[in-house]
């Protein structure tokens, strides 16, 4: 697309963002391992590894992950269980519970730390299963090797956007979470805030804490440990409240947090921050706290 990145006064479209492609590749690399071996510092480094003041569009997955030959993040996490246990009228499985929790966390930490713009890809917003495959016949390479086609099938050449709208499926909660993320950004504008500070990357607790704008993000990636009275460093004094909770029942979570609780800061420095407050952080959850007064 010639002139796409040239400034508008010079006759271009004026698109001046870079695509942060390393993030999606990192998630697929991590999903091929157990989440118990994930390194918090490695995740933070990949998400923040961009040049100062260079705007980036970030995304958790794209065509590189969803086209034939690979799997979507949701399918990496939940695999064949997605065929039988995504209906709300039947019990879930540990794999489904784990997958839905991590899928929400992956999307939010990517949006929170990965750049100044966020991109969804063809059903990623509700955890679309399977892959995309275009109709194709056999292909003969210059070496003479023949790559088999799919008999020109249209079976995987589509996205089931009805899954995210179905009240009786768990996809609905994952889609509701995506909407809530977008509304959070619309209200607070954290992605374009100049203030960003990562205060904690704790490998043993599997916790990541960072500030962006007036929001404080707390991610507990631990598979079993929930932490009471967990101290969270912050820069601004006042009262904080829960602005987004991945464990909310609306999003397919277990509602382990009381959203009516007020969190007051104390002049207690923590993690190189001048102030702090204490929270309960359940396992495999992401919670965003907003300064209210």
Image: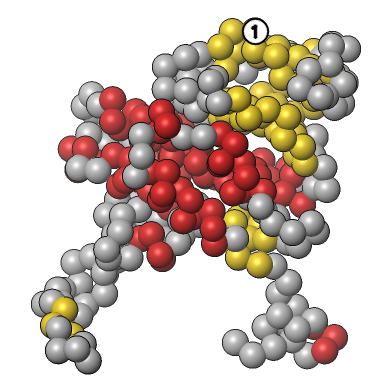
Q: Is residue 216 visible?
A: no
Residue 68 figure quarter: bottom left
Residue 281 drawn at (x, y percent): 57, 17
Question: Which residue is tagged 1?
Answer: 229
Mark 1: secondary structure: strand
Residue 22 drawn at (x, y percent): 54, 58
Q: Is 56 drawn above or below residue 222 in the view shown?
A: below
The residue at 30%/47% (across/down) is 75
The residue at 67%/83% (across/down) is 4
Q: Quadrant of the N terminus?
A: bottom right
Residue at the far top in the pictured view: 229
Q: Could you say which is closer to the camera, residue 253 or residue 208?
A: 208
Q: Is 17 drawn above or below residue 25 in the view shown?
A: below
Relative placement, left or right, of 86 versus 231 is left
Q: Quadrant of the C terminus?
A: top right
The residue at 72%/35% (across/down) is 198
Relative placement, left or right, of 199 versus 162 is right
Relative placement, left or right, of 180 versus 290 is left
The residue at 34%/28% (across/down) is 97
Q: Could you say which is closer to the camera, residue 262 or residue 53?
A: 53
């Amino acid at each position: 697309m010639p002139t796409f990145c040239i400034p508008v006064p010079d006759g271009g479209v004026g698109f001046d963002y870079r695509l942060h492609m390393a993030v999606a590749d990192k998630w697929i690399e991590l999903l091929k391992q157990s989440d118990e071996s994930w390194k918090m510092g490695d995740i933070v480094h990949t998400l923040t590894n961009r040049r100062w003041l260079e705007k980036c569009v970030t995304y958790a997955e794209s065509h590189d992950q969803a086209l034939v030959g690979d799997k979507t993040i949701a399918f990496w996490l939940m695999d064949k269980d997605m065929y039988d246990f995504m209906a709300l009228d039947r019990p879930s499985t540990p794999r489904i519970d784990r997958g839905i929790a991590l899928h929400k966390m992956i999307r939010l930490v990517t949006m929170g730390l990965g750049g100044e713009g966020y991109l969804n890809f063809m059903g990623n917003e509700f955890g679309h299963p399977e892959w995309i495959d275009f109709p194709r016949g056999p292909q003969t390479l210059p070496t003479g090797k023949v790559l088999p086609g799919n008999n020109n099938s249209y079976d995987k050449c589509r996205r089931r956007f009805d899954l995210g709208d179905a009240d009786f499926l768990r996809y609905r909660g994952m889609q509701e979470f995506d909407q809530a993320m977008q509304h959070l950004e619309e209200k607070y504008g954290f992605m374009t805030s100049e203030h960003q500070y990562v205060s904690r990357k704790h490998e043993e607790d599997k916790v990541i804490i960072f500030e962006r704008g007036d929001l404080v993000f707390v991610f507990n990636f631990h598979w079993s440990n929930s932490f009471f009275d967990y101290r969270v460093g912050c820069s601004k004094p006042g009262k904080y409240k829960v602005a987004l909770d991945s464990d909310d029942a609306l999003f397919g979570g277990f509602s382990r947090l009381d959203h009516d609780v007020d969190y007051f800061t104390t002049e207690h420095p923590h993690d190189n921050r001048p102030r702090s407050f204490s929270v309960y952080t359940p396992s495999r959850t992401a919670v965003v706290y907003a300064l209210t007064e």
